[in-house]
Amino acid sequence: MEDQLINILYVDDEVHNLNAFKASFRRVFNVFTAESAKDALPILAQEEIHIIITDQRMPQMTGVEFLESILTIYPEPIRILLTGYADIAAVIDAINKGQVYLYVTKPWQEDELRIYIEKAFEIFLLRKKNKELNEKLLVVNQQLEFMLRQKLIS
């Protein structure tokens, strides 16, 4: 893993959950918190968020709805869904609609969640590297095509 602080956005309508998360992880990760999907948007606009952790059951918008709503604008962050309820429909929605990497039940265990976050960050870095390599490959292919056309024309 790179020597880079992992930027996490944790969205939960229960303030004590946000405080507990921040208290547990602020020394290890760069933690941003929001009490709603609406409050999360300015953070996403201003910060490079690597991992989004969201509660499923929130008043205005569920976690899955939030993740689905930001997918086209912020496709890069790895998504983790937290819930205190074993709702299989929510799990299926999370995977299909919100592109959720992991589904964690509450109450979460600090050590376990830290490992999940670190693994999610590894995936974030691999996807980023893959995207960069694909972009370089595209440029090289375009250069090769240009050179081939030049040779065919001459």
Image (cartoon, helix red, strand yellow):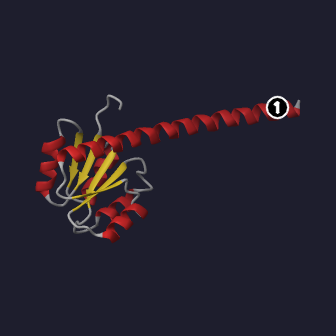
The reply, left or right, for residue 42 in relation to residue 139 is left
Occupied quadrant, residue 120: top left
Q: Considering only vertical position in the picture, is 96 above or below 147?
A: below
Query: Observer-nearest residue: 116 or 40?
Result: 116
Residue at x 15% of width, y 60% of height:
14
Q: Considering only vertical position in the picture, is 1 above or below 85?
A: above
Query: Observer-nearest residue: 107 or 62?
Result: 107
x and y percentages locating residue 65 in the rendered image: 34, 65
Residue at x 19% of width, y 53% of height:
108
x and y percentages locating residue 70 in the rendered image: 38, 57
Q: How many marks?
A: 1
Residue at x 31% of width, y 50% of height:
52
Query: Observer-nearest residue: 146 or 19?
Result: 19
Q: Secondary structure at mark 1?
A: helix
Q: Is residue 94 visible?
A: yes
x and y percentages locating residue 123 in the rendered image: 40, 43
Residue at x 62% of width, y 36% of height:
137
Pick out the residue farthest to the left: 16
x and y percentages locating residue 75 in the rendered image: 43, 51
Looking at the rendered image, the quarter that the N terminus falls into is top left
User: Which residue is identified by label 1?
Assistant: 150
> What kind of residue is marked 1?
Gln
Q: Is residue 48 visible?
A: no
Looking at the rendered image, the quarter that the C terminus falls into is top right
Occupied quadrant, residue 11: bottom left
Q: Residues within 10 Å of mark 1 (few under 14, many from 20)?
A: few
